[in-house]
Amino acid sequence: MSQVKKPKFWRSLAERDNTEDFRERAQREFFVKADEGPTVPGRRRFLQLMGASLALSGCFPEDRLLPASKRPEGTIPGRPEFFATTMELGGVGVGLIARSYEGRPIKIEGNPAHTTSVGGTSVFHQASVLEMYDPDRSKGVARFAGGKRESSTWAEFDSGFLKAWATGDGAAVLAEGSSSPTLADLKRRLIEKAPQLKWYDYQTVNWDNEREGAKLAFGRALRSELKLALADVVVTLDCDLLSGHPSAPAYARDFAGRRTPEAGNLNRLYTIESAFSSTGGAADHRLPLRSELIKAAVAYLDAVVSPQVNATGTPQPSPQAAFLGDATAKRFLDTVAKDLVAHRGSSIVVAGSGQPPEVHALVHRLNGILGNVGKTLILREEVEQERATYAEQIAQLTAAMNAGQVKSLLILGGNPAYNAPSDLQFGAALAKVQQAAHASLYEDETSQLCHWHVPLAHWLESFGDARAWDGTVSLAQPLIAPLYGGRSAIELIATALGEKEPPLALIQRTHGERIAGEALWRRAIHDGIIEGTELEVVPLVALKELNVPLAGRELGGIAATDELELTIAPDSKLYDGRYSNLGWLQEHPDTISKLTWDNAVWVGPSTAAALGVTDGDVVTLSAGGQSVDIPVLIIPGQAKGSVRVHLGYGRSAAGQIGGSKAHGVAPVGVDTYQLRTTKLLSFGAGASLKKTGKFAKLATTQDKHSIDDLGANYIQERIPVLVREGTVAEFKKDPAFAKHRVHHPPLLSLWKPPTSYEGHRWGMSIDLNKCLGCGACAISCQAENNIPVVGKERVLFGREMSWLRIDRYFKGDPESPAIASQPISCQQCENAPCEQVCPVGATVHSSEGLNDMTYNRCIGTRYCANNCPYKVRRFNYFNYHMDMKEKANQVKGMVFNPEVTVRFRGVMEKCTYCVQRIQAVKIEAKNHRRKLEDGEIRSACEEACSTGAIVFGDLNDTQSQVRKLQDLPRAYALLGQLNVRPRTLYLAKVTNPHPDLEQKEGAEPAHHG
Amino acid sequence: MTTAADVKQFHTPLEAENAFAQITENVCRIAETPKPPKAWYIAFAIASSIMVMFFASIGYLVWEGIGVWGNMNPVYWAFDITNFVFWVGIGHAGTLISAVLYLFRQDWRTGINRFAEAMTIFAVICAAIFPGIHIGRPWLPYWMFPIPNQMDMWPQFRSPLEWDVFAVGTYATVSILFWYMGMIPDLATLRDRSRSTARRLVYGLFSMGWRGSSRQWHRYEKAYQLLAALATPLVLSVHSVVSFDFATSQVPGWHTTIFPPYFVAGAIFGGFAMVVVLAVPARQFFGLKRMITMRHLENMNIIMLVTGTVVGYAYGMEFFIAWYGGVQEEGFAFINRAFGPYAWAYWTMLTCNVLGPQLFWFKRFRRSIPVMFVIAIFVNVGMWFERFVIIVTSLSRDFLPGSWGYFVPTPIDLTTLIGSFGLFFTLFLLFCRFLPMVAMAEVKAIHYNHHMHHHH
């Protein structure tokens, strides 16, 4: 082509340079051809980009969030937007993606880019949206004087408290122990400006023991980051690694990645613990052992392992602990030692947060001598090297308060009057402070003892930052203006400092170069993380000599009922009690006990028999001079002589759900913090249990009526058929072993069910080998599908509404059973028994094989639910949304997913495979005239699952993940012998027992028809 | 060869030599007397109060939701359907007595057929209320009827509940027609004896111009025979269809092929027990001993003995098949029935239904009023428990042990159950008060036959 003369005037550089593209386009009638769409990013990416840009255009860099008076360009009403953000819990941030409809966040998913989430979430993350909309949250500044509450304003607080506090004498802060770099920066500035100010941190659930253990072992505070994907052998010691650890979502994902028998590299998990945890449920071998004996067990492991690996340093003398006289325990520990030695460099030993620093030190030593450090376990520098433990800090603060040294105290979050160690009498000490202010989400127990209460903004309402377990900083951005005019901790401290900058600018200031400039910032706020901020990896550190003497009870040899051991742990649903006003979590059945709306003292079957107590007996549980009355719940697998209580219940100022004196709402459960003293923070001996003669009804969702022997024996017969399980040896011999657990005659149907589904054929697979029973899927389902909370009375009646439940069965010896967990939701049968019996055709089959429920058509005969062999249908016995008639509760309506009908009383409901998500993606794909991609549609349960146990997809697509999984030989249909042809298939559990511990189980009862 | 004595023995249950006038007088007097016996007032006061409680309970249910009952997951049906099946079952005796025994020329039926039929209708009324109120949205039961509508909805005919709609609907229609048609000559008698205009008008309206001409009698007999023939298969079909609700489902303990005959036998059993429960006091208080004789009662007791034994056989056979079928869940469902948490209900049922009626092997007990009254009440209790055991026990423990539950009734469950008896007895007492309780015309025909035979 000949050279064209450059035009004198040009519209664009392209025209000026007369590029190929420009010339080609200039020839066209229309600049963009009709059939030439924009290059399509994936839906998710598209929405993320759109969301991020909205965040930028709408929120940033404004100080205040205002409703848009004009529709922002690019938004379509009814279409969700996604924003990356961060929730901090227990001092660790987890990166999340929030889904928002018209400025209303309603659903939380994990952020795959975040190192602690890796796409997974926990029940706490899932329920946090409900927390934000909670009508019981505090709605303004309040002043308490002379036992009277007065409404106040931020301006009054700023002038009446904050100003004087920040400059005055005897000022102190009690914060929650945040990992926020911005807050840390502000703290530094604050102390620089007011050196007299003392800053204390406290949180109940913490990993201080591990930190202190590292100090013992290495001489400095180091954080262990486990690489479970590389570990062939994992030993957990009183540690709920897979759902109780701050990094649980990531750990669970890594762990589950090694539970695919087809890949041929199954890991092996040994768990030694006093009370069942979901990690114990996932273990190949579990040894119930009192928490106080764990130290002896580790010492024994050290003594056995050290000589075999030519370890440096002096090993612990082999404890001839009496518990080793127990042949089972000895054999267990010997096998663990053998397996650890055999897997040097590819094993992990990890202890729980409740175990003392010496145990953690010994664990560090074990990992060190086994050569695991730097391979399966990475040590990272802690952010703060020098800080006292939280327990020490709160004790110091209380002492200072009692001594009159604290004149004005700002309590930033937390609820110390409720959850400080009870012997400190924090509440009484607080009375000696002249001016105390409490900033929190709720006007709680602590607020009522202070002079000021100010509302804290929810993390979904404010800018913030937090560090992941590996230290990576992630950003939080507001999805909505603070509903009740709260301020974030950052804002509060910034105000005290007299900072003029809005929080966002402070965050940008903190991170400086890393997010400076438009491009870097946009990327950080879009991805939710700031790259390259992880904590520094520490190369091999020399181990210090350890001397961990064992004394008294730690040597074991105590009869089951002599002086019980009491262990105290955070709750699997309410955490430290902060979530006690969330109905979703209160009604969520505990992983192990399946208890809702209550806590109870867990007692093992033989201990219960020896004490003469049974389920529901209210007992006086005493330890360390404190006592509470609490009902008993017998939990198989609870270590002999050890009893367990969970924290977070018995709140007197939680709200109208969790208990509130002001509203006349009785507390849910029993306040077990009373038992938690500075000497007994997580476990200790000397507990006793006495019957009061009273009886409490416990609302468990399983075994509602105590199961008689007849039923119990039958369940033992049935479990192998329902939750199919085999060993890796069985699997190698016959990968289809699960299919042979049931034999039945050929299946015939009365009528011809549709055999082909053109287009899509939805299906799901649930891998029992990966499921931990944590329940994040169930809460995710509840949030996504507007499932109502029904309350304790109705759970007692057996009317819970959960669309997805996790059946939990104990298997084998009641003293040391295994757990079989099985998530069950509608199986979307092709030959659906429910469809055949509905007289009005309210439940019908879709052309894509879904079992659709037409709520409008349902008249509520409940015949479908009777005929459903999986019992997954749920009936609205009442109108469960009556509470929203009250004006104050109307805000609850905001958490509803607008894509899902809110059901009225009298109609049946059930899992739909998240049909609204299917339709949304289908429409999106159709609009872009493209095919659906596998993995594009994810059901709410699948999305929440950290381990990837649940996979949804199109069975017609031979390349889809779900199809491949369903085609695996170990896939089986639950109750397939009924010829209902479920669309959900389960993948059988394949355990990896050590040959030395493998018990020859009796031949599996198979039913020959 | 049958002797005259045999004939008398066989065809004349009436012990006394009732003159036609006497029969008319005996029956009509009850409906005509300005003041019924005090017992009637007391009974009516009690029954109607209980009926009020019934409707109050229903009102509360409709207002609040099904949750006021104890129904739960997995026991989605409990007292509601138990009561429904119980009342439908009661309704069987009426048709059986009126139609089947009529076709078999069992003349002794004439003394009791009228009020057995009435009982049937009232029982069916009670029964029909339950499917209507047990649904979650009780204002929409008409969606189960094939009514052309602009909502583009149509019933789903594969559902046994839909079959119930037609089975029970047909049964109720035929029963009412049969009862009413049979009553026309007697209503005419009452009309003719009326002294007040109001009575004359009302009875006149319902007797449809009956004059007693031989042409009318001829038509009447034909129609009666036809209706009897039409009603007979219904005795078998209604409860068979009701049993399909269970038999065609796949709940272990429901999914049983023996259900149709077993349910029919049970229904007749329970129905006759109810007739005895009603007949014993009625003949006492209204002076009908000469028309509802010991012979009637004894025959009914024999039927109870037979059907009770059939039911007992069915209980045994269920167990046998559950074991013989070799399906784990089925086997467990039955073991659980007898020895699980609801064993008390099972053994109550078995004692009342199978053991009690065995006393009727002995003539002494068959003819003893107190014994038969107690046993009949027991049978009614037992038959209610039979349905309870089938429905609740099976549902409470089905396929997945994780979903097992234990149903406990609420006070509203109890007031609804008891209340339905209030409605039943209220209707029955009104019937006793205002309508001819015994089929006068038929009794007279039998008496005439007997008279003729006697003088041959």
Image: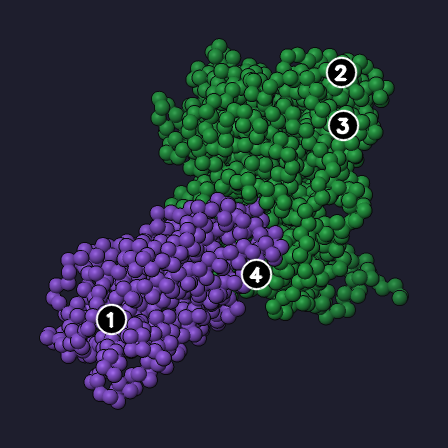
Chain colours: A green, B purple
Q: Residue B389 location in percent, x, y?
A: 46, 53
* Distance of label 1 from label 3 (alpha carbons): 92 Å
* Distance of label 4 from label 3 (alpha carbons): 48 Å
* Residue at figure coordinates x 76%, y 65% from the top left: A25
Image: A277 above or below B367: above
Numbered disc 2: what chain?
A: A
Q: Which mark is residue B14?
A: 1
Q: Which mark is residue A833?
A: 4
Q: Are marks 2 and 1 on the same chain?
A: no
Amino acid under label 2? Answer: Ser
Image: B20 above or below A104: below
**Precedes in sequence: disc 3 or disc 2:** 2
Q: Residue B68 location in percent, x, y?
A: 38, 50
In the picture provided, is B454 more to the left or to the right than B227? left
Amino acid under label 4? Answer: Pro
* Distance of label 4 from label 2 (alpha carbons): 61 Å
Numbered disc 3: what chain?
A: A
Q: Residue A716 location in percent, x, y?
A: 62, 42
Does dot 2 land on a helix, a strand or a loop?
A: loop
Furthest residue toward bottom: B215
